[in-house]
């Protein structure tokens, strides 16, 4: 049986993907979410200022992690290490 991923796991993946500018489709596929679920997480991250919309070299919309998003990503990684590491 497949176990559902938690909020921190999903948000971590989205923030990791946006370390480099990426379009919505790439972020959605990389985070392995369906359209409806993705939009919920994505819009929340945008509203909270954790990712930002930018124009890529072709003038198309891309999204990139903000400094605030990097802080959250660091915290989520540290929490994961504390909770699940064998150290």
Image: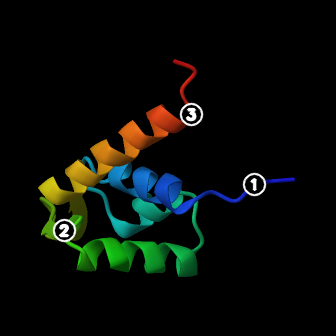
Q: CA distance from mark 1 to mark 3?
A: 16 Å
| Foreground of the two, 47 or 39 | 47
Can the viewer see residue 4 in this picture? yes
Kindly identify the residue that appears in the image at 39 percent across and 40 percent down.
Answer: 77
Please report contact status of discs 1 and 3: CB closer than 8 Å, yes or no.
Answer: no
Mark 2 or 1 closer to N-term? Answer: 1
Q: Which label sits in the foreground, 3 or 2?
A: 3
| Foreground of the two, 43 or 58 | 43
Mark 2 surroundings: few (<14), some (14-19) or many (≥20) residues within 10 A: some
Mark number for residue 30? none
Q: Position of residue 71 (x, y in %)?
A: 21, 50
Q: CA distance from mark 2 to mark 1?
A: 30 Å
Can the viewer see residue 66 in this picture? no
Residue that extends furthest to the right in the rendered view of this protein:
1
Mark 3 or 2 closer to N-term? Answer: 2
Kindly identify the residue that appears in the image at 75 percent across and 54 percent down.
Answer: 3
Q: Which label sits in the foreground, 1 or 3?
A: 3
Label 2, on which residue?
52
- Choose top left, top right, bottom left or bottom right for residue 74: top left
Label 3, on which residue?
84
- Reply above or below: 33 against 1: below
- Choose top left, top right, bottom left or bottom right for residue 4: bottom right
Kindly identify the residue that appears in the image at 14 percent across and 67 percent down.
Answer: 54
- Reply above or below: 60 against 79: below
Q: Position of residue 63 (x, y in %)?
A: 24, 64
Mark 1 or 3 closer to N-term? Answer: 1
Say left or right for 12 vs 71.
Answer: right
Label 1, on which residue?
3
Q: Secondary structure at mark 2?
A: strand
Q: Secondary structure at mark 1?
A: loop
| Foreground of the two, 70 or 79 | 79
Q: Secondary structure at mark 3?
A: helix
């Amino acid at each position: 049986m497949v176990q559902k991923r938690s909020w921190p796991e999903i948000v971590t993946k989205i923030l990791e993907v946006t370390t480099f500018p990426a379009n919505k489709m790439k972020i959605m596929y990389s985070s392995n979410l369906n359209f409806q679920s993705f939009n919920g997480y994505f819009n929340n991250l945008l509203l909270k200022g954790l990712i930002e919309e930018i124009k890529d070299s072709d003038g198309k919309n891309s999204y990139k992690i903000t400094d605030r998003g990097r802080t959250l990503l660091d915290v989520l990684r540290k929490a994961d290490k504390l909770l699940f590491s064998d150290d």
